[in-house]
Amino acid sequence: MDQTGLRSIGEVCAETGLTVDVVRAWERRYGFPVSQRLPTGHRRYGKDVVARLKLMAQAVALGHKPSRAAGASEADLRKLILPGGNNRVEALFVGVVAMDSDLIRQLLRQNMLELGWEPFLLQVASPLLDRVGIAWADGEIGIHHEHLISELLEDFLRTLRQEFHSQPGRGRVLLCTLPGEHHRLGLLMAALAHAALGARTEVLGEDVPIANIAEAAATLKVDKVAVSVSVYFTGEPARGLLLELRERLPEGCRLVIGGKGAARLRQVPGIRKTKELCVG
């Protein structure tokens, strides 16, 4: 950011999670974001532009078309992201704002016990992250709030997954993200979903080189490799990595993808999109 408060396109991408290609494509197709030109010819973007881009990125992450997000008002964008009140989410958000770790842990456990794992992921965990994302885009909370809830939720998902035991005939699954993908929460939600269904889950984590994913799949003799793709990691680079991974996997090992970013990827031959990974 320069002294005027304007951001470079690289800084915009770092703040919104969008790629340079996406930002430029939206500017070309929809007339937004509107950039200012410096005497040097470089683009710069204002604070208000970045705030709206954050909301647009979240709306697209939830499956709304970029053209619809570009034409919506900021109020309508918020409705696209959170269409209705969610008392469970709002109670947790109070804990996020107060940075009350004990309250957050208590409410996470309470919601899980009352709802069960699948409704918990779909009705609480995923919309809570959307709620936090809106508040962050609006400047209502800081990055420290977002980091706190991410860490608490990650701890909770890992602990919860240990309560499920693998069952015969349910298969063995290796879960990971592609190299360059650093978003873990969708991966952990997917791991919980697979474990709850009785599969033996092996989690490599995020940002794993393709060769290492393939080697781990062969060593562990897994039936399936499940890759979580966030909305911030899409397009042809992700598609190319998936094609490479498909070619490297052992014969008979299936490759599936999921997450909010998977919905935005063009279909990749031989790779299935699955609802088991559609949260996060």
Image (spheres, grey):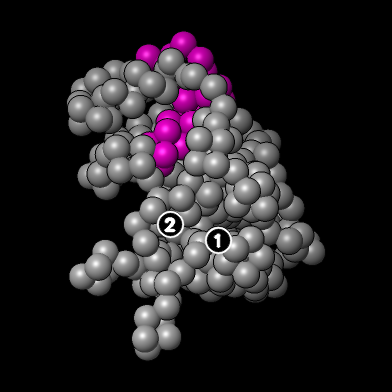
| 251 is within the stretch colored magenta | no
Which corner quadrant of the image does residue 89 belong to? Answer: top left
| 122 is within the stretch colored magenta | yes
Q: Residues within 10 Å of mark 2 (few under 14, many from 20)?
A: some
Q: Secondary structure at mark 1?
A: loop
Q: Which residues are magenta?
A: 110-134
Q: Which residue is mark 2?
A: 49
Residue 53 rendering spot, x and y as whole percentages:
47, 54
Q: Which residue is mark 1?
A: 32
> Is 183 left or right of 141, judged from the image as shown?
right
Q: Which residue ends up furthest to the right in the rendered image?
A: 269
Which corner quadrant of the image does residue 252 belong to? Answer: bottom right
Q: Which residue ends up furthest to the bottom in the rendered image?
A: 40
Residue 139 rendering spot, x and y as whole percentages:
30, 43
Residue at image x 27%, y 39%? Answer: 141
Residue 217 rendering spot, x and y as whole percentages:
57, 60
Q: Nearer the viewer, residue 210 or 217?
A: 210
> Is 187 left or right of 11, judged from the image as shown?
right
Q: Nearer the viewer, residue 187 or 91?
A: 91
* Type of amino acid under label 1: Phe
Residue at image x 68%, y 70%? Answer: 243
